[in-house]
Image: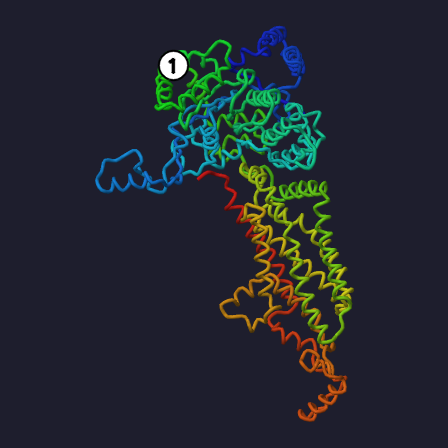
Amino acid sequence: MSRVVAAESNISPARDSLPFFTHSMELDNLSQAHAGASPTLGQLLKCVGDVRKDATGNETPVHQILDLSDTSSVAPLSVPFVLSFNNLTYSVKARRKMSLPTVFSSHRHSLGAAATATDPVSGENLFSRTKTLLNDISGEARDGEILAVLGASGSGKSTLIDALANRIAKGSLKGSVTLNGEVLESRMLKVISAYVMQDDLLFPMLTVEETLMFAAEFRLPRTLSKSKKKMRVQALIDQLGLRNAAQTVIGDEGHRGVSGGERRRVSIGTDIIHDPILLFLDEPTSGLDSTSAFMVVKVLQRIAQSGSIVIMTIHQPSYRILGLLDRMIFLSRGQTVYSGSPMSLPSFFSDFGHPIPEHDNRTEFALDLIRELEGSPGGTKSMVEFNKSWQNMKRSRNNSSHHFQQTEHQGLSLKEAISASISRGKLVSGATTNHSMSSPTSMVPTFANPFWTEMAVLSKRSITNSRRMPELFGIRLGAVLVTGFILATMFWQLDNSPKGVQERLGFFAFAMSTTFYTCADALPVFLQERYIFMRETAYNAYRRSSYVMSHALTALPSLVFLSLAFSATTFFAVGLGGGFLGFLFYFLIIFASFWAGSSFVTFLSGVVPHVMLGYTIVVAILAYFLLFSGFFINRDRIPPYWIWFHYMSLVKYPYEAVLQNEFDDPSKCFVRGVQIFDNSPLGAVPNAMKVRLLQTLSNTLGMKITSSTCLTTGSDILLQQGITDLSKWNCLLVTVAWGFLFRILFYFSLLLGSKNKRR
């Protein structure tokens, strides 16, 4: 399979200063030497590798694009994409801190006094105020370049990235964001872009290669063979400099894994596996040492050179990183204080009256000056105004060249640019080069793979990750076995007496509620995966429905094993009736209880974002379910205003099912002769007295009652307990249906609660 190496058409001044680009003449000489016959791709790569090795000591190849057409022709130059943003403004409501001066000033204003600075303005009141996070920000980013957004904490860097990546609700953001002059639809942006969050959200027990391979399975189309996907992953591992860590697990607090810089590069790799046109990164160098940070930005430079637009926030770049950046935007409290090339920083600050000392780091000087101005009475207003006038002067000075560049870059429509980009191998998520498509949106599919493929890959990833942490299932199995052992020894071989009936009722109530309580361990599973899920679904790696289905399917094997362990431990030891068929139904209802409980807890994990809060809610609701199940108080005795909770109780249906499984045998007797007195105050009198009482009772009723006469069958016990509504099989079906209902509710909680957008 051939690979296409994208050449950079416009080398910025920042790149001219790098040693790698001083050897560009060698490539020119190679081209001239082969004027009669074009140089082969191998010769070009050999030359590039030699030059890179001479310059940096690293022969890592530049970003390689997967060529789906399997042609051997060299790709054309980078397709021009221009992302423009104009007059972006974003405000939020913030709670106002109450103080006596505020209250008094408001009181004076209501009496007709002159307004003061503390009075609420338009859109504000005494309890809230409007905080502007972005204030009329404009600029542009081009393919082949890195746009860096800088500023102090709270300056609006991440907010600007979110605005460009469509992570702010439509009605809250003012201004426009266009790609090649066309407004980007949300569906289109999700397919052609990727967003790398500040936190590294990865599965800890997967290796680097497995993590990238699963990303390839999600992002690359199923029409692409397994071998080609593996080749793409191997090329990406080399590009990211992760060859030595390819077989190392990611790791977490309890498991040693890759380093911080390697983890960050893996995070980037999972989002660039499909060669997105737009790549957004929020603080990709935070928490890294100088060398690791430089390597990360170097990787981003190679990605940009392949024809992508790279936009990132960075707190304070080093001198080496500064040489890799093409455009910079400095923000201060949501306003632009500088926008332009890093090479123009000295002239800007010199014109502003604060020249940068010769040996100072330019960005450090700029950030220090901005902080100093923010603490002054006038703030950075003077710098903001100067930047506007400086930009206007610069535009008028270079009007002709700027007009030429603008015409050149706006020559291709978005549809044409995407079509040309696809033909070069980018957007390998299943896009088509069909020129008859009416719009750019119709050229790229919403998802790279069908539903069943996504479900299979998600299930495989979940099983792989769980298999490497067997202690989680082991602890749950241990809890079930210990509970079963305690119940088996406490209720060992119950007899068919009135006391045995009461003990059976207590055993069933505790056993059914225990199955639900042991499902509470499913709560942190999704809470740990929540932000991984949000990151992957935000840009259409897979469907939410695929995740819900795979989540349910991968839970079933463990639930079957737990149900079998609990059933086998308790059924025969307690002496429950029904033989093999009784055991089979007992196992089925235990399994259905585990299924319903697991689904219920999974649904709560999609609604409640915190583990401890989730555990509190789970324990409380399950206690209410047990209270209204019919064990403590019969259905006929429950007050009418609480009867609805009885029918909503998850414990009610399995509890009634096991009671019917045990007592529904008409030939089985539980109270004979004098046993009728056992649960009454007469139970303590001598047995001879009980016989005489029974004879007297027989004479009074006019029927013969002996010590062997059956007075209470299982049907009578079910009638006493008020279990007359549903058969045991209907109770089983209702329990299973509860599980499916909560899985559906879990899907809607993901659909509504994981938009991952600012309001």
Query: Number of marks in the image?
Result: 1
Query: Does residue 470 appear to the left or right of 548 in the view shown?
Result: right
Looking at the image, what colour scheme do you see?
A: rainbow
Question: Furthest-front residue in view?
Answer: 100
Instruction: Say if 567 sits above or below 163 in the image.
Output: below
Q: Nearer the viewer, residue 542 or 481?
A: 481
Report the residue at 69% width, 40% height from top: 465
Q: Nearer the viewer, residue 181 or 376?
A: 376
Instruction: Say if 512 sits above or below 266 in the image.
Output: below
Q: Amino acid at mark 1?
A: Phe
Report the residue at 69% width, 75% height from top: 714
Dot 1, how many residues are within 10 Å of its Cα: few (below 14), some (14-19), or many (20+)? some
Q: Quadrant of residue 129?
A: top left
Q: Quadrant of the N terminus?
A: top right
Query: Does residue 448 appear to the left or right of 476 in the view shown?
Result: left
Instruction: Quickly name the residue at label 1.
Output: 352
Residue 647: x and y in percent read 56, 65
Q: Secondary structure at mark 1?
A: helix
Question: Furthest-left residue in view?
Answer: 112
Residue 542: x and y in percent read 58, 40
Residue 759: x and y in percent read 44, 40
Residue 655: x and y in percent read 65, 65
